[in-house]
Image (cartoon, rainbow, N blue to C red):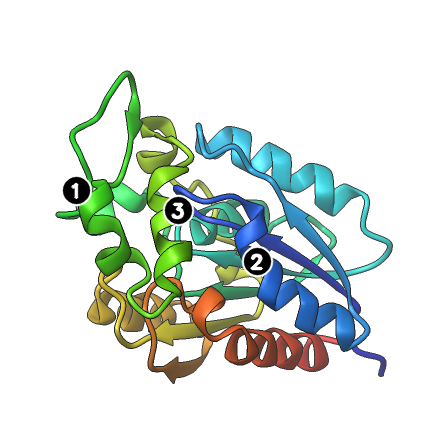
Amino acid sequence: MARINNIVLVHGAFVDGSSWAGVYDILKDDGFTVSVVQNPTISLEGDVAATNLILDEQEGPAVLVGHSYGGVVITEAGMHPKVAALVYIAAFAPDKGESVNTIVGHPPSFTPPEEGYLFQDKAKMAAAFGADVDPKTAAFWADSQVPFGLDANDGAVTEPAWREKPSWYLVAMDDKMIPLSAQRQMSKRAGSTVVEVPGSHAIYVSNPRAVAVLIEQAADASS
């Protein structure tokens, strides 16, 4: 059977879809049709709606990929009929009733909520989020943060798609945002095919090849 050709990428908190550029380029070079969701990260409901808009326009089945908080989004949006497989990249894979907040609480690099939004402490973001990313890129992220809504942080999954769809999970072994133990626990619970790769929470930027390889494995296995 032919591989699944459609890949939909969902970013997490504090950054936008352009952070997928390295993975996008590899997948495009390998002949995939790739869509990047620009989810606003204000509320889980809004991010699922944004993801569904992109899924609706896919011609045929798709592999749905999420990084970090994007894992919450794909867990909820993954019940869309065009989603054939889920890929979690150093991501949250919540069960019913769980959210980012219930899994990791308030990480040390977060500042107190402001006007219903969360930010990373600029002085702490690079070390916490992407210690192996080019320092200029990490500094730019710190200075250009997308506000992360409390309604997104607290947004609880209603029906986890990983109970119905096959999943793959890349564990980032040097992640300072989602503890290694939590990544392993969530991926085991989901019954995911797991790879563990040295790298920070932003491994999809620092090692896009490893991420693309796993996505392509999911596309081949789910065809």
The quarter of the image holding the N terminus is: bottom right
Who comes first in sequence, dot 1 or dot 2? Answer: 2
Whether residue 92 is visible to the viewer of this picture, yes or no, is: no
Residue beneath label 1, please? 106
Residue drawn where x is 61% and y is 73% of the image: 215
- Residue type at tag 1: His
- Dot 2, how many residues are within 10 Å of its Cα: few (below 14), some (14-19), or many (20+)? some
Tell me if residue 30 comes above or below residue 53 in the rendering: below
- Dot 1, how many residues are within 10 Å of its Cα: few (below 14), some (14-19), or many (20+)? some
Q: Quadrant of residue 15?
A: top left
Q: Quadrant of residue 86?
A: bottom right
The quarter of the image holding the C terminus is: bottom right
Whether residue 131 is visible to the viewer of this picture, yes or no, is: yes
Q: Position of residue 181 (x, y in %)?
A: 21, 71
Q: Nearer the viewer, residue 65 or 23?
A: 23
User: Given the current orientation, which residue lies at the most extreme top position?
Assistant: 115
Residue drawn where x is 36% and y is 27% of the image: 151
Residue drawn where x is 57% and y is 60% of the image: 65
- Residue type at tag 3: Trp
Give the alpha-carbon distance from disc 1 to disc 2, as whole Å. 25 Å
Residue beneath label 2, please? 20
Residue beneath label 3, please? 141
Tell me if residue 181 comes above or below residue 74 in the rendering: below
- Dot 3, how many residues are within 10 Å of its Cα: few (below 14), some (14-19), or many (20+)? many
Give the alpha-carbon distance from disc 3 to disc 1, as whole Å. 20 Å
Tell me if residue 104 comes above or below residue 191 in the rendering: above
